[in-house]
Amino acid sequence: QVYLVESGGGLVQAGDSLTLSCATSGRTFSTMGWFRQAAGRTREFVAAHNKNTGRTNYADSVKGRFTISRDNAKNTLNLEMNSLKPEDTAVYYCAASSYYNRLVVESEHQYNYWGQGTQVTVSS
């Protein structure tokens, strides 16, 4: 059984930083990513990472502010979020794909394992 469990969400002020973590159990994935869904909006891509190539991709809206990384020893995926804005408020989801070995992908349809999500709220 595969589990993805996010942690680290919370309420912060604009300009603050927050780091999300996603603990993975059951197996190791090469391609993992973060998505988010704000109230009343569709889920959107945030960042992705491939363990085998080290390659990362980011949504334009978070580029330069967010950093995705992997702790292979702990089998966790992290998302360091700096200079947070109210528009970053959303439920953040960790996702993993068993389809790819070396690719970094951005479509939610390319991921087949999902966590339950963690709420991030940024006040102005």
Image: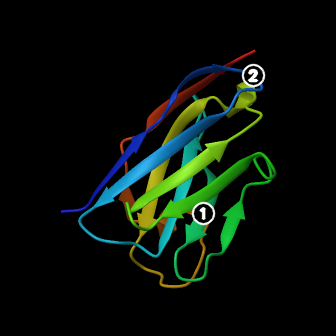
Give the class, few, some or many, for how many residues have Cα within 10 Å of label 1's Cα (few <14, many ≥20): many
Q: How is the image coloured?
A: rainbow
- Quadrant including the N terminus: bottom left
* Residue 9 horizontal/vertical position (percent): 50, 31
* In this view, 20 is above or below 60: above
Q: Residue furthest front?
A: 73
Cα distance between the residues tagged 1 and 2: 24 Å
Which of the two labelled residues, at mark 1 and mark 2, occupies the earlier sequence position? Answer: 2
Q: Nearer the viewer, residue 95 or 21?
A: 21
Left or right: 14 in relation to 49: right
Give the class, few, some or many, for how many residues have Cα within 10 Å of label 2's Cα (few <14, many ≥20): some
* In this view, 122 is above or below 29: above
Q: Residue furthest top?
A: 124
- State the residue at coordinates (45%, 35%): 118
Q: Nearer the viewer, residue 77 or 72?
A: 72
Residue at which label 2 appears: 14
Q: Nearer the viewer, residue 1 or 106?
A: 1
